[in-house]
Image (cartoon, rainbow, N blue to C red):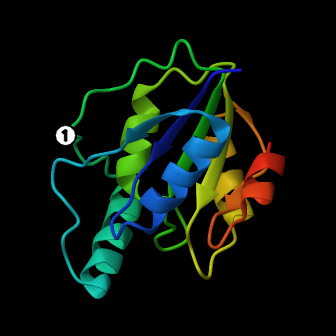
Amino acid sequence: MDTLVIYFSKTGTTKAAALKIAGIKKADLVEIKPEKLYEMSYGKTVLTSIKEIFTKARPALAMEIPNIQKYDRLLIGCPIWCGFVPSVVLTLLDMLDLKGKHAAVFTTSGSTKPMKLAVKLKKLYPEAKWHKPLNANGVTEEEIRNWM
């Protein structure tokens, strides 16, 4: 089963988890790159995230959209902002044909459980086959191998 790890990282925490997961799963790797970087304080990031959630914003991307046709499995990594994925992640997911793809999310949040996020994503993208999410904070190699 060919796997693609797709991730968004503001501080580098999710990137480190994505690199580790991709290495263990022998997966290809794609970074979600917003056109307008979230280079702001934590407080401003929270306010921006809340605004994007309420307006259902889809921030522009500064990247090539990956061709996911050859992949059976998508592992999507991100922090959790205000109880949900950063809107820039949704921008990319909206552009992908997820029909029949096995998908799972891994997060790097210290407070919100990834299952809440996974339920929301399953409702937004029901064409994918969603699997158990992973809290990637301090995750071990064995936990990654057992995931999915």
Of 57 and 44, which appears nearest the observer? 44
Q: Quadrant of residue 12?
A: bottom left
Please tell me whether residue 43 is drawn above or below residue 104 in the rendered image: below
Identity of the residue furthest to the right in this view: 146
Going 71% across and 58% down the picture, which residue do you hit? 134
Going 46% across and 25% down the picture, which residue do you hit? 96
| Res 109 seen here | yes
User: Which amino acid is tagged 1?
Assistant: Ala
Question: Taking 60 as reference, is 76 left or right?
Answer: right
Please tell me whether residue 127 is drawn above or below residue 123 in the rendered image: above
Residue 91 screen position, x and y as percent: 36, 41
Residue 147 screen position, x and y as percent: 79, 49
Identity of the residue furthest to the bottom in this view: 43
The secondary structure type at the circle numbered 1 is loop
| Res 56 seen here | no
Going 35% across and 50% down the picture, which residue do you hit? 88
Question: Taking 74 as reference, is 16 left or right?
Answer: left
Identity of the residue furthest to the top in this view: 70
Residue position marked by numbered label 1 in the rendering? 62
- Quadrant into which the N terminus falls: top right
Residue 25 screen position, x and y as percent: 66, 38
Going 46% across and 70% down the picture, which residue do you hit? 81
Please tell me whether residue 124 is drawn above or below residue 96 in the rendered image: below
